[in-house]
Image (spheres, grey):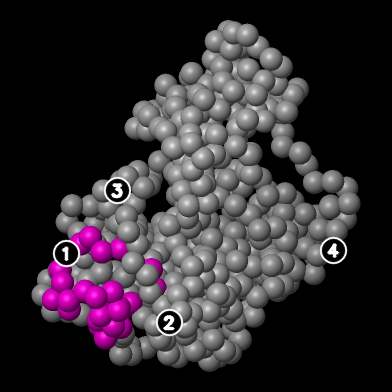
Amino acid sequence: MVTSASRSPLIDDPLSDERWQLVQRIVASPPFQKSGRLRDLLQYIAQQTIRGYPQELNEQHIGEAVFGKRHGYSPLEDSSVRVHVRQLRLKLHEYFDGVGRNEPLILEVPKGSYAPTFRAASAKPQELTTAEEHRLAPATRRAVLPWILCAILAALCVNLFINRPKTSPPAVDTRGNNPPWPFAQVFDPRHQTLIVVADGNYGMFRILTGKRGSLDEYLRRDFEKKTALKLDQAGSGFGDYIFGSTLTSFADVANVVSLLKLSGPLQKQVSVRSARDLRIRDLDHGNYVFIGSPASNPWVSLFEDKLNFRETEGVVGKSLKAFVNTKPLPGEQTRYEGLRSTGSDGDDYATIALLPNNTQDGSVLILQGLQQEGTEAAGRFLADTENREQVQRALGIPLSYRMTDVWFEALIRSRTVSGAPSSTELVAIRRIH
């Protein structure tokens, strides 16, 4: 039996309630020991729900009651509640995947709500309806052959890249032993640096299901399992393959090679991991490089609230993806649309963002394109000395600057011919404060 926030009875003494006892075990667990704010947030929304007042749990009310915001503050201008609730969802995943794996109750904070729900651990999330299953089955059968070809081509691309003839690499600043700006903020002797490449399987599942997906769903893997089952019903065996394999793109491989070169003598402190193998506990400290957009690397969504240019799309797999300019400056567009699909000719867009990590003791670099060509172009752009100097001038930073406390976001346009970026240019830039 599932007890949701909408059916919570009014209880005079929540301390004796099994749901409240679960909350106390959660806040006393290791995932919550480093954040008193998350502990306060979880206890408050749980207590309000158990007492029978879930309808009062809106963003402004929580901001005033838990975060000490002034009365009547504007949540549109202050996203701290949304950011902390997103972090709370991830910490809850970590708890129930670890020390709380044997709990009889599961606590969740549904996306789009601030009121927690409680369900028995044996109760499974709602399955697809019969109508959805019938709609999905023919679509997945039609999609099997193209994705098999994509997987084969991806493997060939990686093999060709590794064994490619030696050509002139992008211009790399080799003056001195230290990485050039801004890479000195991502590769430094005090931190380990983790490069997280996109999950090609996740992009396939999104298109096959037509669902946008989210980091919450990605951590559960529920939608991937269901799609794999549907594919296997078509008799291809492809579902098992993409569910159990780890695929990334040629663009990610190219960017990793470039980044390792730029790390210089600090390369021994750099490791590479697929988004599929990352866990929220891995992101507490250190430097990180995320390659890909939320559509292929959902971890990037953790930082979207800090960015001005944000990826958007209409119908997954059918509509043009674009970067929305949330606060356009004079002469800028409100929307920058990219290629219709990977492999086509035209202009694609990408963003390069450098910002502090969640614990404020390291740096995060994000390279994300609307298509694979844009992602590759972002890495090429930043590897070029002249382009980096152009970014410095646009930010008003002296070219001799060697400090490591400048945060920025840049939008670039790349001209793509035959599936490869041929030229890049800086379109817009922002300081991140």
Q: Is residue 308 above or below residue 167?
A: above
- The answer to whether residue 237 is left or right of residue 302 is right
Sequence-first tag of 4 and 3:
4
Instruction: Name the spot of residue 303 as percent of width and height, x first.
Output: 44, 55
Magenta highlight on residue 59: no
Can residue 375 be spotted in the picture? Answer: no
Q: Secondary structure at mark 3?
A: loop
Q: Residue at x 73, y 28 (%)?
A: 6
Q: Secondary structure at mark 4?
A: helix
| Residue 427, numbered circle | 2
Mark 2–mark 1 distance (CA, rounded to whole Å): 25 Å
Sequence-first tag of 4 and 1:
4
Can residue 62 be spotted in the picture? Answer: yes
| Residue 15, numbered circle | none
Crowdedness near tag 3: few (<14), some (14–19) or many (≥20) residues, C-alpha within 10 Å? few
Q: Residue at x 52, y 21 (%)?
A: 23
Outermost residue on the front side: it is 72
Q: Residue at x 64, y 44 (%)?
A: 112
Q: Quadrant of the C terminus?
A: bottom left
Instruction: Name the spot of residue 85 as percent of width and height, x first.
Output: 51, 40
Residue occupied by mark 1: 403
Which region of the structure is painted magenta? Answer: 382-410
- The answer to whether residue 393 is left or right of residue 26 is left
